[in-house]
Image (tube, rainbow, N blue to C red):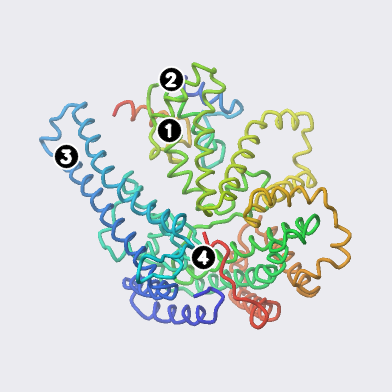
């Protein structure tokens, strides 16, 4: 999780990822950020996030994103 | 059948009468029948292509669903449960690949038809085919819109976001629902079918609110768009004659015409659907108030942008080859360049396709790529803007700066739209440069604008219309006007009065009847 927060902080240093649960709905992350994020996650965790998983529910918070990474790693 | 024709008004009145006369569970059948009648007015040949889309998408969706159902049943069985984790993973991958073998041909057939008709045969005379001899191929109405919408549906089934529809007639309705075939919005399957197949029950509120929206659409189309059309086509039609200030004036008029035309048409679509108890997603969010081009594209023709993002931008960006390319680029050129590769390549691909979607001319491809370049440059300049605003912290919040941002966005977009107007790349660049070098501003202001096919009264009516639209847009910042009106004490009566005022205004100031051509919506051609 700390690694993920580090990646997110590189994209938007000013966001509090512990409390912000509306990263997509609140328009904090745009499509460019999402792609950068997915590429970084692929590099760091060796997990490929497919296009169909790019939905607000999976990207709205660091927590939900971490759950997605764990689920995909598990699969 | 044009939305602005008397025939359409009679057609709609008849539909509403029949629609609400039958029980709610059969209303979708009425919509299907009327959609088919509406489509038949646009030419019977279109049925062949729409029929192909309906049948192929129905079969593809059902086959994909069957593969997934079989997979789930197997994995839930004792035999499936006994598989190891890796075996399960391999089995799932095999099923997915089976589904892909159904999806890909369906996409190829449908996008193939679209490409064939729109880019290869469109406008050409077919001499070889006896039944078409001497006839130019006419693009079937709404083919771009319904193809994108239906392909979105089967991709969603492939992604297991939705279940395949079992009734082919319902798939036919989703594809052919007539208000959407004119110029979209390209609707999401889940959102649209939630009320298309099972509409909301009759309510006077829906009828009144929908009628208001429809009339507002007619106001934009008839008072502004169709009136300005004459002046815009005069300026564009004679580029050698109308240079400098005239080109700039044409560009401004086109910005107003296109906005009124496209948003007006969508207002009619959404309003009419509301009257039928069907919810259609919004396609605009006051786009001319955008601070930059990126924001503008999130607020203009939202459904097309969403479609490309969902089904093209993300899949390309996160595809294995792209991630590999990004990795290689990182090791070769460093992190900063490497991580930009997927974004740059996907953005370029999306914008080139968006350009081509609009038409087959080189002008559209250039239009798409210029949009892409501007968006990427803005993205790269973000840190610079950040530093600039860091030094002048209050500037961003001033009304003057906000207005500057909106005007800048509209100017850039209108400049790009000149490619759509002149449809010739070198000519467009010459006309654009002429705005700054040719002058003629005094000539235009001193009466030149009255020689473009519109009288002073016409310009005054259009300007008043634009100001009303602007005022309404400003009021919409605090939420929907219709909703606020409905909440008031005599809300229904107030809404009825508003409808009457709009009708009278359209009858007095609308551009229709003798001396005006009934024109179809600009986006109908795409």
Q: Are marks 2 and 1 on the same chain?
A: no
Query: Which quarter of the image is occupied by the C terminus of chain A?
Result: top left
| Front: mark 2 or 3 | 2
Q: Is residue B367 left or right of residue B328?
A: right
Kindly identify the residue that appears in the image at 28 percent across and 42 percent down. B100
Between the C-alphas of marks 3 and 4, the distance is 43 Å
Q: In this picture, is B228 found above or below B109?
A: below
Between the C-alphas of marks 1 and 4, the distance is 34 Å
**Which secondary structure, mark 2?**
helix
Which tag, 1 or 4, sits closer to the chain's start?
A: 4
**Which secondary structure, mark 3?**
helix
Which residue is under mark 2? Answer: A44
**Which secondary structure, mark 4?**
helix
| Quarter holding residue B98 | top left
Q: Are marks 4 and 2 on the same chain?
A: no
| Residue B76 - label | 3
Q: Residue furthest left?
A: B79
| Residue B270 - label | 4
Count of number-bearing discs: 4
Tell me the subunit letter for badge 3: B
Residues at discs 2 and 3 in contact (Cβ within 8 Å): no
Which residue is under mark 1? Answer: B318
Q: Are marks 2 and 3 on the same chain?
A: no
Between the C-alphas of marks 2 and 1, the distance is 15 Å
Which tag, 3 or 4, sits closer to the chain's start?
A: 3
Residues at discs 2 and 1 in contact (Cβ within 8 Å): no
Q: In this picture, is A30 found above or below B470?
A: above
Q: Are marks 3 and 4 on the same chain?
A: yes
| Front: mark 2 or 1 | 1
Query: Which quarter of the image is occupied by the N terminus of chain A?
Result: top left
Between the C-alphas of marks 1 and 3, the distance is 31 Å
């Amino acid at each position: 999780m700390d690694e993920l927060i580090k990646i997110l902080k590189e994209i938007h240093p000013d966001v509090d990822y512990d409390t912000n649960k509306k990263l997509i709905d609140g328009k904090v992350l745009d499509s460019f950020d999402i792609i950068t994020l997915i590429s970084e996650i692929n590099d760091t965790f060796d997990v490929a996030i497919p296009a169909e998983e790019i939905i607000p529910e999976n990207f709205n918070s660091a927590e939900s994103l971490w759950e997605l990474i764990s689920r995909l790693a598990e699969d | 059948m044009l939305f602005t024709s008397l025939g359409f008004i009679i057609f709609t009145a008849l539909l509403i009468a029949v629609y609400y006369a039958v029980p709610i569970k059969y209303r979708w059948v009425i919509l299907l029948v009327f959609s088919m009648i509406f489509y038949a007015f646009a030419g019977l040949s279109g049925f062949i292509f729409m029929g192909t889309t309906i049948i192929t998408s129905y079969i593809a969706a059902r086959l994909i669903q069957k593969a997934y159902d079989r997979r789930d049943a197997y994995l839930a069985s004792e035999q499936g449960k006994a598989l190891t984790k890796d075996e399960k993973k391999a089995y799932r991958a095999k099923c997915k690949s089976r589904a892909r073998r159904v999806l890909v041909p369906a996409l190829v057939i449908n996008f193939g038809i679209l490409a064939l008709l729109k880019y290869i045969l469109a406008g050409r005379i077919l001499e070889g085919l006896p039944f078409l001899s001497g006839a130019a191929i006419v693009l079937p109405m709404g083919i771009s819109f319904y193809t994108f919408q239906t392909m979105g549906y089967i991709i969603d089934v492939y992604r297991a976001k939705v279940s395949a529809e079992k009734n082919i007639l319902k798939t036919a309705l989703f594809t052919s629902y007539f208000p959407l075939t004119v110029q979209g919005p390209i609707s999401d399957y889940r959102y649209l079918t939630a009320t298309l197949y099972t509409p909301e029950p009759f309510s006077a509120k829906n009828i009144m609110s929908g009628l208001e929206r429809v009339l507002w659409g007619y106001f934009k189309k008839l008072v502004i768009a169709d009136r300005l059309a004459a002046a815009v086509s005069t300026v564009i039609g004679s580029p050698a004659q109308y240079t400098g200030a005239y080109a700039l004036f044409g560009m401004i008029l086109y910005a107003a015409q296109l906005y009124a035309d496209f948003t007006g048409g969508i207002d009619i679509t959404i309003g009419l659907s509301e009257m039928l108890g069907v919810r259609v997603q919004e396609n605009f969010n006051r786009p001319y108030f955008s601070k930059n081009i990126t924001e503008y594209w999130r607020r203009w023709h939202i459904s097309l942008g969403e479609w490309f993002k969902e089904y093209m931008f993300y899949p390309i960006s996160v595809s294995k080859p792209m991630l590999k390319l990004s990795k290689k680029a990182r090791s070769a050129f460093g992190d900063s360049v490497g991580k930009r590769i997927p974004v740059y390549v996907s953005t370029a691909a999306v914008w080139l396709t968006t350009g081509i979607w609009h038409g087959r001319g080189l002008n559209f491809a250039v239009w798409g790529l210029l949009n892409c370049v501007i968006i990427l440059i803005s993205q790269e300049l973000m840190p610079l803007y950040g530093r600039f605003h860091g030094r002048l912290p209050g500037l961003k919040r001033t009304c003057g700066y906000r207005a500057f941002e909106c005007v800048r966005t509209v100017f850039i977009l209108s400049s790009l739209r000149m490619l759509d107007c002149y449809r010739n790349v070198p000519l467009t660049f010459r006309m654009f440069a002429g705005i700054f070098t040719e002058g003629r501003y005094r000539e235009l202001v001193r009466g030149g604008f009255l020689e473009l096919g519109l009288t002073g009264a016409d310009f005054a009516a259009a300007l008043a219309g634009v100001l009303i639209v602007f005022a309404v847009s400003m009021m919409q910042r605090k939420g929907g006007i219709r909703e606020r009106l409905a909440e008031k004490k005599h809300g229904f009566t107030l809404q009825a009065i508003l409808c009457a005022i709009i009708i009278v205004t359209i009858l007095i100031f609308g551009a229709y009847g003798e001396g005006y051509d009934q024109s179809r919506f600009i986006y109908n051609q795409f």
